[in-house]
Image (spheres, rainbow, N blue to C red):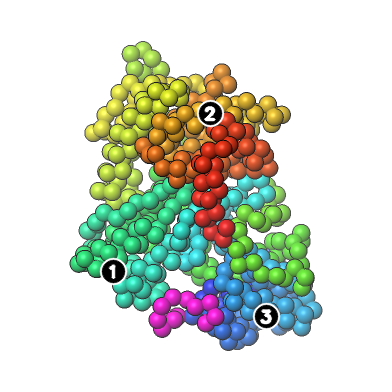
Amino acid sequence: MICLGIEGTAEKTGIGIVTSEGEILATCGDQLYPEVGGIHPREAANFHAEHLVPLIKDALNQSNLTFNDIDLISFSKGPGLGPGLRTVATAARSLSQNINVPLIGVNHCIGHIEIGKLTTGAKDPLTLYASGGNTQIISYESSRYRIIGETLDIAVGNCLDQFSRDIGLGHPGGPIIEQQAQNTDEVIELPYIVKGMDLSFSGILTSAINKYKQGTPLDVICNSFQETCFAMLCEVTERALSYTGKEEVLLCGGVAANKKLREMLKIMCDEHYVDFYMPPMKYCGDNGSMIAWLGLLSYKEGKTGIKNSYINPKYRTNQVEVTWIKNKYKHNIQLPNNIINKGAEADIKETKWNQNNAIKKYRIKKNYRENKLDEKLRLQRTKEEAKLIHDAKKYNVKTPYIYSVDLKEKTIIMEKIDAPELHEIIENTNNINELQPLLTNLGQTISRMHEGNIIHGDLTTGNILIKDNNPILIDFGLGKYSNLIEDYGTDILVFKKSLTTIIPQETEKLFNWFIKGYNIKSPVIKKIDEIEQRGRYL
């Protein structure tokens, strides 16, 4: 079977032709470069309209095919700019009817993942999708691609582009900033905003523009901008990697063109003993081949035809039922003998303290981060974690006992607690209703912790141990003190997202039990919904 795919979610018009065996026969495309400002939706739509027919002809010539050889037409139905999506959908409908072949609309974001897997050989990767319109950390779990981390405001590509435009460097900004950054090693401090597994780029954008206007040299600003934004991306990917236990990381999207980002992610993956993949550059950005390949994957059980060819500018990655993945991969990363666990923040080793079994948590240097930023974060988080673990006990929250803290070495020696993690309890429970008392108890525990103005910062099911049916909280490495409802809500949202990677079909039930214990009437509950709605296309 041969599919012709049409892409046009933003400023790039793409046509691809792919076989059901995964052979890419043609990839043709063109891109709108606005003279001033960013991408105007109507101008992008007009650009698609002008270039679709010539590009289709180019793709057929490149593949040595005619319309008689095409068996399926696939198009990107979203997410993206409405006018462009409508133009592409109209062209796809007309073409499918004209040559009398089936028509299928697909999700643009998943197209990036699947073409990445096809061209690299990755089997079950954790995906960092970084582009002008999207920044998502995606993991396949239980028949869907789950978004376990994302930007809560603008995408990283948009952040780079807007910075470049606002200071007069032009569009697109990524390549210009990358070139300027290569002229210096100097780095200044910019806002570093990671919220659980989510990120925010609007603050760093404003700060970088202001510092440039105040006289900071352009190359220093650009280098600092890249170092900070990309360190944030690496950190949330690292955290998701540690939590999901995946053995592969896939980078896709237009920002993958940045050499610095690729280098930083490769270093992070090497330090976690996992494989790093990135598609060839022509398949990283928006392209028609990814749409054609996804069309073939989803055709057998997808919704085809004109009646299903509506567009969806807010088409979320996790809205798609993934029917083409049949294998469930088991992951088993082999760690060095002296490391019992490798978290996102630190290596965990067994040790002894006054004849007691203990663990040593060592915040190793992150070689993907700039030295000053890395030193600051490691020192700050080591100090804060030790204090938070101690102070949480004042609010009847069970945590390990701290035996020793070494700020120079960035290590904490603490009590070793032999108890299963919450996700193990959930996975091994035959009757989900048996978990209600435990989840309600956990909600009460977190409520008490928040009453003490303590934010855990990484409240995943892997950081909650269960002993005698009581929760014990560990790993406060991203924690802080705060009395803001926003921070309470973010804390709980991390927990909710972690549930979706274990048992998505029962997440709402489990989370509602948790909320009942926390206090369903609390204003924090409303804030959780508000924060959640900041995700892309919500």
Q: Name the residue under label 1.
A: 180
Given contact means CB atoms under 8 Å apart, are the residues at marks 1 and 3 in contact? no
- Name the quarter where the N terminus is drawn: bottom right
Q: Label 1 sits on what residue type? A: Gln
Q: Label 2 sits on what residue type? A: Gln
Using the rendered image of the protein, determine whether residue 272 is visible from the camera's viewpoint. no
Question: Is 57 included in the stretch rendered in magenta?
Answer: no
Q: Where is residue 497 in the image (x, y as percent from the top left)?
A: 55, 44
In this view of the protein, which residue sits in the foreground, 510 or 31?
510
Secondary structure under the numbered disc 1 in the rendered image: helix
Using the rendered image of the protein, determine whether residue 316 is visible from the camera's viewpoint. yes
- What label sits on residue 91 in the rendered view? 3
Residue at image point 31% right, 76% down: 168
Relative to residue 333, is residue 224 drawn left or right? left
Of the image marks 2 and 3, the number of the one nearer the N terminus: 3
Q: What stretch is highlighted in magenta?
A: 33-43
Secondary structure under the numbered disc 3 in the rendered image: helix
Of the image marks 2 and 1, the number of the one nearer the N terminus: 1
Q: Residues within 10 Å of mark 2 (few under 14, many from 20)?
A: some
Q: Mark 2 points at which residue?
A: 444
Question: Is 39 included in the stretch rendered in magenta?
Answer: yes
Residue at image point 65% right, 51% down: 144
Q: Label 3 sits on what residue type? A: Ala
